[in-house]
Amino acid sequence: MPHVTPFALLRVLVAPALVLTIAGCGEGEPRSAAEAGRLVVHKSLSGGPLFIEGSVTRLKVVGEDGSVVVDGLREAGTLDTPIFDRELPAGTYEVSAVERPCQGSCGLLDPPAEGTRCTVTVDVRGDRTADVEIILSGLAGGVASECSNRTPDEQSAQQPQQDARLATALSPAAVTRRCRDVAGIKTVVVRCPTRLPGGGRESRLGNLVVEGSGDWGNGRCEWLTGYRYPRQGGRDPGPVFHLVMGGRCEPLPLTTRDGRWPADVKGLEPSLRLVGYGSLSVGDPPGTPFPRVRPRVLARTSVGTEPALVLAFGPYPGSGTVHGGHQAIVFNRQGEGQTVSLHLTRGTRAQRVALLVEVAESMAEVG
């Protein structure tokens, strides 16, 4: 078995303990076998040591009639990329997962790590998305496995405690000054977060690096700025290493289609670069427009009393946007669209959603 270290690469996550949680949608609605829903399975990390060579997930999904939907190895590219995302006939499915540690490289695998084995049953309902989350964590005293199946109401009643590594702190003066500088050349109201991730013992807010000229906004009715977090000790990227935030004069639509945002990209520009451009294929005729790449909807939430969406972006360059590998929250305030986008390396899915909400709620108009 490989040695463990807290500095393993995130693309090959594994830990001695695994918790599998599930959030179903549309409780209480009638189910029809003829309808189709969507099942999404993804990993998240809750701290603790990781196997230094990483691991690959052995995932198995079985329908109520015994049919095997998938049974094979699924390697996670990033924390924001699902290891399974497929439309399925409505019905009940058994989802089971176990980690297989890598030997040197993931071309050669150890036997399954039994402490990471877990199984849960999920209802897939028509026109809904059922999310299964594999939460990886480490226990110093050995291995453990726990499965839970909670409804959305139960999840909202149990608000996640913020992980210390995802703690926020007051925004540094340099960020506030940058927001004021941008506000001086824009007609859109610039709302700057007063709290940013990076507090606690791993705080690096004092060393944030402004990217480019400091504003990527398209015209005077959109503002967008990016910051890089410095690495810790030149090795550990820390809990977050990229921050993008901005706003536009017009409200952002909060409609979705097929589990992705927005329902329609027409009329979205300026889009705060939230919808990327994909690549053309060999043989496409001249003049073929570049396809738009819409991010996946990770959660529905709220910022204060306003509805909001949390989006998950695939890795760059496939995402076709500066938000590649990020999770972002989109919402409206006083009729103007707002976003905060973070490339996070740690924290459970619920913790990352809570962090985005906290930062978004701290956004205030600069003087």
Image (cartoon, grey):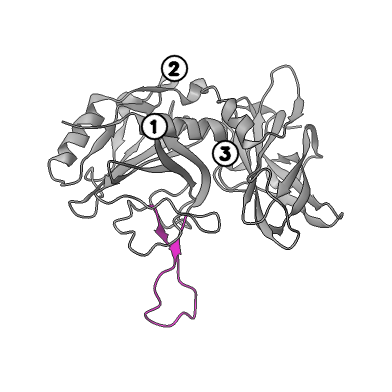
Q: Is residue 226 left or right of residue 104?
A: left
In the current view of this chain or complex, which residue is farthest to the right?
66
- Image location of residue 127, percent across then percent down: 62, 56
Mark carried by residue 10 = 3
Mark carried by residue 201 = 2
Badge 2: residue crowd in 10 Å (few <14, some 14–19, many ≥20): few
Q: Is residue 167 above or below residue 51?
A: above
- Image location of residue 329, percent across then percent down: 42, 41
What residue sits right under mark 1 in the picture?
304
Which SS class for mark 3? helix
Q: Is residue 198 left or right of residue 173?
A: right
Give the residues drawn in magenta, as a range: 274-294
User: Residue sitting at 70 percent across and 31 percent down?
Assistant: 19
Contact between marks 1 and 3 (CB within 8 A): the answer is no
182 or 316, which is in the foreground? Answer: 182
Q: Which amino acid is tagged 1?
A: Gly
Q: Does label 2 or label 3 sit earlier along the sequence? A: 3
Q: CA distance from mark 1 to mark 3?
A: 32 Å
In the current view of this chain or complex, which residue is farthest to the bottom?
285
- Image location of residue 119, percent across then percent down: 78, 38
Which SS class for mark 2? helix
Badge 3: residue crowd in 10 Å (few <14, some 14–19, many ≥20): some
- Image location of residue 64, percent across then percent down: 83, 52
